[in-house]
Image (cartoon, grey):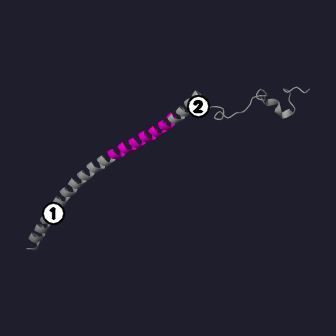
């Protein structure tokens, strides 16, 4: 009888032969719906999914807060620019009147 733990080909010699007798089973098949290890795995997966959703929510909230801050800053700058424009329009009107006054005096 041939010994099961001998190498039959030269290239096999780097492989671990201890896994030969192990059976391969799917864990979901041999565990019922009331099995505690199955429930633990399902809950761990559910917790992981909720943590991922929470991470997305936090990311979205941070993005929202950053966007609100930018909008507030831009609104303040717009108000400031409107004030500057009004001042420049007033100065423009004053200078226009002075120029017209100087041209009228020059043409006399």
Identify the residue shown where x is 46% and y is 40%: 53
Identify the residue shown where x is 88% and y is 25%: 3
Crowd around label 2: few <14 · some 14–19 · many ≥20 (10 Å): some
**Looking at the image, which residue sits at the far bottom?**
108
Residue 31 lies, with reference to residue 62, above or below; the image says: above
Identify the residue shown where x is 45% and y is 41%: 56
Identify the residue shown where x is 10% and y is 67%: 101
The picture places residue 60, in percent across and down from the top left corner, at: 41, 43
Quarter of the rendering containing residue 21:
top right
Say which element carries label 1. Answer: helix
How far separated are the C-alphas under marks 1 and 2?
82 Å
On residue 2, the disc is none
Say which label, 1 or 2, has the lower sequence index: 2
Residue 66 lies, with reference to residue 17, above or below; the image says: below
The picture places residue 50, in percent across and down from the top left corner, at: 48, 37
Q: Which residues are magenta?
A: 47-69
**Looking at the image, which residue sits at the far right?**
1
As for residue 68 lying within the magenta part, the answer is yes
Q: Is residue 54 left or right of residue 28?
A: left
Camera-nearest residue between 44 and 33? 33
| Residue behind mark 2 | 38
Q: Quadrant of the N terminus?
A: top right
Residue 83 lies, with reference to residue 17, above or below; the image says: below
Q: Is residue 44 left or right of residue 19?
A: left
Say which element carries label 2. Answer: helix
| Residue behind mark 1 | 93
């Amino acid at each position: 009888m041939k010994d099961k733990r001998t190498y039959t080909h030269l290239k096999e010699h780097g492989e671990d032969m201890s896994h030969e007798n192990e059976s391969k089973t799917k864990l979901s098949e041999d565990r019922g719906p009331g099995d505690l290890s199955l429930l633990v795995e399902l809950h761990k997966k559910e917790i992981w999914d909720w943590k991922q959703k929470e991470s997305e929510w936090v990311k979205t909230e941070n993005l929202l807060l950053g966007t609100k801050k930018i909008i507030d800053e831009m609104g303040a700058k717009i108000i400031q620019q409107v004030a500057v424009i009004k001042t420049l329009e007033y100065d423009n009107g004053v200078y226009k009147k002075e120029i017209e006054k100087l041209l009228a005096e020059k043409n006399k």
